[in-house]
Image (tube, rainbow, N blue to C red):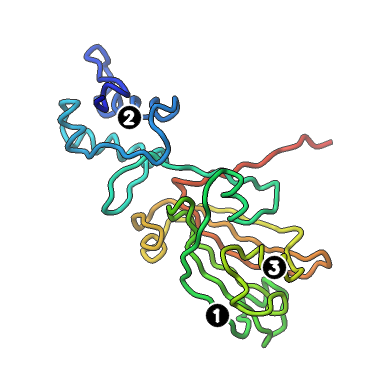
Amino acid sequence: MSFSDRIGRLREDNAAPLYIQLQQLIRDAISEGVLDQAEAIPPERNLAIEYDVSRITVRKAIAGLVEEGLLTRRRGAGTFVASRVEKSFSRLTSFSEDMAARGKRASSTWVSRMSGPVNPEESMALGLAPGSTVLRFTRIRLADDEPLALEISTIAGHCLASLDVVEDSLYAALEKSGNRPVRALQRLRAVPFGAEHAKMLGVESGHAGLLIERHGFLRDGRTVEFTRSYYRGDSYDIVAELIEGS
């Protein structure tokens, strides 16, 4: 079955521009489940031939859907239906736990792990005295082998025995040591990815991203964690439950 047989064809009686029509066909196919998450979209040349339109028309249609976050481009691989993950702000969970709850396999690619004296920014964030030791972990977080986030965590040195106790899950290691956060404050803002972060996550420089800063606290009020996570905006949704105030 051809792509146009699956999602529909352009209509001569439709006055909308051709790229808008093609966008709507793909958009409807995604929302109705005709196209699955992570499914490949035919190359621009193939679509242009199949729909008898110019490659410029196809390119404009695809670019608009990428901006909407419905499609994603993978360098050297092509264009795919975006696989989106919802993150609830109402529960304190790790990346690994979030992925497991959504039936996805979490994994990591280590960028660096090191220990050293706290710097001024970390000292303020963690409430540590100058000269205190901290552990730093930088990882690319993947869901079903797809790069989703760059995670940069700083942990107070007294909370973990060593760098090596952290394997796949930082929170699992903190839990084993009795120092898993019981509450957190999170700040979210939109950011464009710079060249370095974009390369790590397999997107173009300037790609829309979400920066989540988390301060995690122990039961006695001490700060255990300062984490900055850069999430791909085309793959991640934030969900918050709102309760009516009195």
Label 2 residue SS? helix
Q: Identify the residue shown where x is 54% and y is 67%.
A: 152
Q: Identify the residue shown where x is 29% and y is 27%.
A: 22
- Residue under pointer 2: 23
Q: In this view, does 172 lie to the left or right of 75?
A: right
User: Badge 1, how many Cα within 10 Å: few under 14, some, many 20+?
Assistant: few
Q: Position of residue 216 (x, y in %)?
A: 70, 63
Q: Identify the residue shown where x is 25% and y is 37%.
A: 42
Label located before the other in sequence (2 or 3) = 2
Closer-to-camera residue (227/178): 178
**Residue type pointed to by label 2:** Gln
Label 1 residue SS? strand
Q: Distance between the residues labelled 3 and 1?
A: 16 Å
User: Badge 2, how many Cα within 10 Å: few under 14, some, many 20+?
Assistant: some
Instruction: Give the number of the mark in front: 2 or 3.
Output: 3
Q: Where is residue 114 in the image (x, y as percent from the top left)?
A: 55, 80
Query: In the rendered image, which quarter contains the C terminus?
Result: top right
Label 3 residue SS? helix
Instruction: Give the number of the mark in front: 1 or 2.
Output: 1
Asked if 232 appears above or below 11 in the picture, the reply is below
Q: Position of residue 208 (x, y in %)?
A: 43, 51
- Residue under pointer 1: 114
Q: Identify the residue shown where x is 68% and y is 75%.
A: 160
Marks 2,3: beta carbons within 8 A: no
User: Badge 3, how many Cα within 10 Å: few under 14, some, many 20+?
Assistant: many
- Residue under pointer 3: 174
**Residue type pointed to by label 1:** Met
Query: In the rendered image, which quarter contains the N terminus?
Result: top left
Q: In this view, does 160 lie to the left or right of 115?
A: right
Give the residue furthest to the bottom.
Answer: 131
Marks 1,2: beta carbons within 8 A: no
**Residue type pointed to by label 3:** Leu
